[in-house]
Image: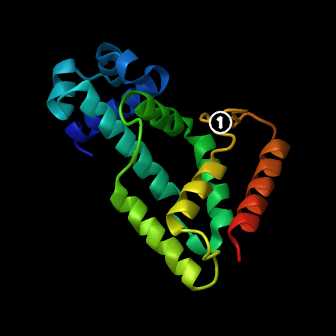
Amino acid sequence: MDRAQASRRRLLDAAAVEFAAYGVAGARVDRISNEAKVSKAQLYAYYGSKESLFDAVLADQVDAILDAVPLTAEDLPGYAVRLYDAYLARPQLVRLAAWGRLERTPVGHLFAEADEALKIQAIARAQDAGHVNPALPAVDVHSMVISLAMTWSPGSLTYTATAADPGVDHDRRRASLAAAVRHAFTP
């Protein structure tokens, strides 16, 4: 990794923490550049604006989840459990997405539709193969599985789990999540 790439990585990492804590409006470029050990001039040269940096951070966090948890349409319960674990490991993503909804994109798609289209196609193929209930639109199945996996995430309205919770609680949630997804979407 060259120096410019290393600087960009430090900026993305520092900005993820800052934006997750304060949102776009409350985040401070001074804190981000100080934490990343990069000048504000470099930050603006790389990203142009605080808003563009937020977009880059959100895209980076989404890419990390997509890389860590690829969709397995034939095993939606397993996919949901892996998403649960990913949200535990990366609670910033859910907070960033919530800030994105609050401050930037209150309706419609929050992330790139191209990635979602591929997942919906995979779910449709799994429906055709008899692995997923074909009575439900694939786009809705995708959204509901993600929402179920987020039941205990920082976006939850009832309870937010953390990696520090007892293992028995995580095991119970994983089993409940897998059972709910299996019962909801298996033909």
User: Which residue type does callout 1 highlight?
Assistant: Ser
- Which residue bears the numbered disc 1? 156
On the picture, is 97 further left or further right than 1?
Answer: right
From what the image shows, is residue 77 above or below residue 24? Answer: below
Find residue 136 and report its image quarter.
bottom right
How far from the left and from the top, in percent, is residue 118?
41, 68
Quadrant of the drawing holding the C terminus: bottom right
Q: Is residue 111 left or right of residue 183?
A: left
Q: Which structural element holds mark 1?
A: loop
- Image point (56%, 69%), residue name: 72
- On the image, the x and y values in percent for residue 69 come to 53, 58
* Image quadrant in which you'd find residue 126: bottom right
Colouring used for the render: rainbow
Give the number of callouts.
Answer: 1
Q: Position of residue 18 (x, y in %)?
A: 42, 23
Identify the residue at image location x=41%, y=40%. 107
Query: Is residue 36 in view?
Result: yes
Q: Position of residue 81 (x, y in %)?
A: 67, 56
Query: Residue at the spot x=48%, y=73% of the render?
Result: 122
Between residue 43 and residue 138, name the one nearer to us.
138
Dot 1, crowdedness within 10 Å: few (<14), some or many (≥20)?
few
- Residue 33's place in the image compared with 174, above or below, is above
Q: Nearer the viewer, residue 51 or 42?
A: 51
Judge left or right: residue 120 versus residue 172: left
The outermost residue toward the front is: 135
Residue located 38% across and 40% down the image: 58
Identify whether 103 is placed above or below 135.
Answer: above
Residue 9 visible in the picture: no
Q: Is residue 175 above or below residue 17?
A: below
